[in-house]
Amino acid sequence: MAQWDTLVDGALASLAARRVLLNTRLIALPPPPPPSETSFAGPGPWDRATVEIQVDRASIRQWLAANGEVSSQEEEGELNRELILFSGNDYMCLSSHPAVREAAVKAAQEYGMGPRGSSLICGYTTYHKLVEESLAKLQRKEDCLLCPTGFSANTALMSALGSISSLLAAGRKPTQDERIAIFSDALNHASTIDGIRLVERQHQAAAFVYKHSDMSHLNFLLSSCPMEKKVVVTDSLFSMDGDFALLPQLVELRKKHGFLLVVDDAHGTLVCGENGGGIPELFGCEDDIDICVGSLSKGAGCQGGFIACSTRWKRLILSRGRSFIFSTALPLPVVASVHAAVHVAKKERWRRSVIWEHVRYFASLTKLNVTSPIIVIIVGSEEAAVKAHRHLLRSGFLVQPIRPPVVPPNSSRLRITLSCAHTSDDIRRLVDALAPWLPTRQYAEQGCASVSRL
Ligand SMILES: Cc1ncc(COP(=O)(O)O)c(C=O)c1O
C-alpha cells in the first residue's frame, strides 16, 4: 500500500539519519540437514501421545476438591489419571512428530541451545534465516521476522507501528492528527491489546475498538475518524470464541478506506488453507493482507512467533519492535524443529483433512453451529463452568473452563479444541459426556451454541 510504504520509508530515513537503523547479524552455520523425507499417511503412536495425558493424582484431587465434592473413592486416589486432552493448541500434533523430534535432537547435539542473545547481537543464525524464508513463502509475503513468541510478535509490531508517528514528528510529541489510528476488534488477543496500550500511552497512537466482527460499526468508526494513518487489526480465528474474522468484508473495507490490514493468524497458520497458509489462504485473500502475525506454538507444535511482511516493514520492526529487540532469540533446536514442522505440515496434508472432518463430525453430532477446531459452549456462571469441567474430568476428558477476566462475566465457557490425533470415538464419547450442556434440538436448529442449564 503506497501511503504506508511512504510512511515506513520516512521512518527508516529518520532512523538512518540518527544512525539507529539496526540489523540482525547473521551467525553463519552450515544449514540444517534437509528434513527427513519419510512421511506418514495417517496418525502414528507419536500423534496419540499429544492427546493422551497422565495427570498427577494430587492435581486431579485438587481440581475436584475446590467445591468439596470429592467422593471417598476419589479421596483415596483411585480415580483414573489418564485423560484425553481437548484443550491444547497442537492441532496438527506436530510437537511429537518423528521429523520434528529428530531435527531438535540433531541441532541440540550439534550446538546445544545455540548462541544466546538478541537477534541483533548474536542470536540470529542460518537456521533462523531459513525458517523466516520458508514462512515468508508460506504466507506469500516478501519477508518475515522470527520473534521469541507470538505474544512478543504482536507487541513488537505495535511498538514499531507507533514509532512511525514519533519518528516522523522528528523529536516533537506527535499531534493527535499525526498519530496512528488503530482500529481493533473487541475480542482481539491480549498481546494485541497490550501492544496497543503501550503505543497509546506513549501518545503515538489512538485506539478505536469496534464491536466484535461488526463491519458496520467499523465502517462508521473509520468514516468518522479524520486521522490519516489508519490501521485495522484483527485475530483471524478468535481463540476464546472459535469464530473467524470476516476477512473478505475487511478486504472490501480496506479498498474503501485504504487502511493497513494486520491479521493475527495464531490459530490458523498451518491448520487452515490447502497449503497450510492459514486463514488468509482459506479465504483466498493473502495478497490483500498487509501484515500477517503468527504463532509457532500452535499449528507448528513448537515455540515462537513471526511477522510476515514486506522487507521495509521488517527493517522497521527490527529497529523499533521492543519485544523483538530486547529479548533472546529462539534456541536452535526450536528453530530446527519449526523448520521440520513446516516441511511436514506441507507434505502430510491428511492432518488438515482429519481436523476438518472432526469439525464436521462434532457439528453433526451436536447440531451446533461449529465452524472451526475451536469449539465454545457457553454455560454462564463461573460455577457452572467449573462444574462442567469436573464432570468431564470424571468422564476422562480434560476440557478447560474459561472464566472472567478472560471472558466477560456470565459468559464462562468450555473451550474444546480438536486435533488430528483425536479419533471419531473420542469425539463421540466427549459429546456423550457433554450432553447436559448441549442445547435442546430447538436451540440447535437456531444454530445457538449458548446454553445456561446449570
Ligand atoms: C490470537 C493469539 N495471538 C497470539 C497468541 C500468543 O502466541 P504465543 O503463545 O506464541 O505467545 C495467542 C496465544 O494464545 C493467541 O491465541
Image (cartoon, grey):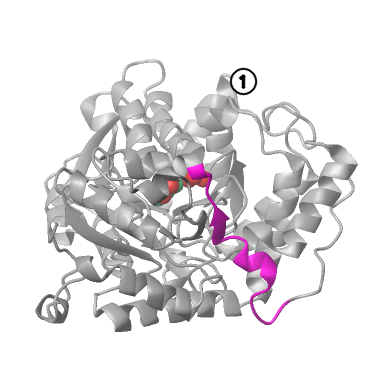
Instruction: Name the quadrant containing residue 332.
Output: top right
Q: Name the residue located 66 percent from the left edge and 34 percent from the top edge.
A: 329
Please indicate whether residue 68 sits to the left or right of residue 266 in the image.
left
Quadrant the C terminus occupies:
bottom left
Residues in magenta?
40-57
Residue 98 at what x, y percent from top left? 75, 63
Quarter containing the N terminus: bottom left
The answer, for residue 300, to whether it is visible in the render is yes
Q: Residue at x 14, y 51 (%)?
A: 223
Q: Nearer the viewer, residue 323 or 340?
A: 340
Q: Residue at x 59, y 45 (%)?
A: 304
Residue 243 lies, in percent from the top left, at: 30, 64
Asked whether 107 falls inside the magenta stretch, the response is no
**Residue nearest the observer in this picture, 285 or 225:** 285
x and y percent of residue 441 in the render?
A: 14, 81
- Amino acid type at mark 1: Arg
Q: Residues within 10 Å of mark 1 (few under 14, many from 20)?
A: few
Looking at the rendering, which quadrant does residue 155 occupy? top left
Q: Is residue 159 above or below residue 397?
A: above
Is 430 placed left or right of 225 in the picture?
right
User: In what element is the residue under mark 1?
Assistant: loop
| Residue denoted by label 1 | 19
